[in-house]
Image (tube, rainbow, N blue to C red):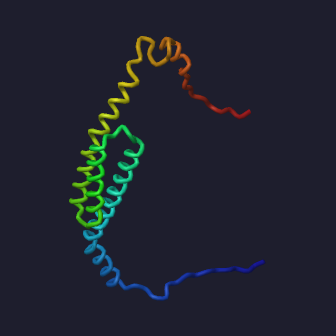
Amino acid sequence: TGKEQKITIASSNKLSKDEIDDMIKQAEKFADADKKKMELVEVHNQAETTVYTVRKSLEELGEKVTQQERGNVEAAVSDLEAANKTDDVDGIKAKIDALMKVMEPISQRIYSEASQQQGPKGPEGPSGGQSSQESSKKDDYVDADFKIVDD
């Protein structure tokens, strides 16, 4: 058609070199405050995740957790929730660690009980009497290089 169309986007106001330098200096000036705020947000998120995970675990474990253990965990959870309402990063981290220390013996006990219930596998092993050679034959595969030839 012989017609040409062009679009040109131009800034109506340009920043001077001094304004750009001032903005860079302000960004550097507030970098430490931004890092502290980011750390605070991450710690708040970690605390909320920990509380959710612990409550979910208690719910799933049900009667396997004694009332005393459950009371200790709930006390640690409420301490963490109270600390999470503040802006004290170190205090929140300390409460997270305290909650994890309360949960650790419970988790270890439940894990050891579960492994004792399964018991030893015996001489037949996990394959139910098959020899390990027979079961490994099923899992064998051959890795090969190939080239595609076009005719």
* Left or right placement of residue 92 versus residue 127 in this view: left
* Left or right placement of residue 1 versus residue 148 in this view: right
Residue 52, x across and y down, in percent: 38, 53
Identified at 41% across, 14% down, the residue is 122
Depth check: give the residue in front, 121 or 30: 121
- The relative height of residue 59 versus residue 114 in the rendered view (above or below) is below
Identified at 27% across, 50% down, the residue is 99
Identified at 37% across, 50% down, the residue is 55
Outermost residue to the right: 1
Depth check: give the residue in front, 54 or 38: 54
- The relative height of residue 112 versus residue 10 in the rendered view (above or below) is above
Report the quarter where the N terminus lies.
bottom right
Depth check: give the residue in front, 65 or 105: 65
* Left or right placement of residue 15 versus residue 30 in this view: right
Residue 143, x across and y down, in percent: 54, 25
Report the quarter where the C terminus lies.
top right
Depth check: give the residue in front, 149 or 35: 35
- The relative height of residue 80 versus residue 8 in the rendered view (above or below) is above
Outermost residue to the bottom: 12
- Residue 121, located in which quarter of the rendered image? top left
Residue 43, x across and y down, in percent: 30, 59
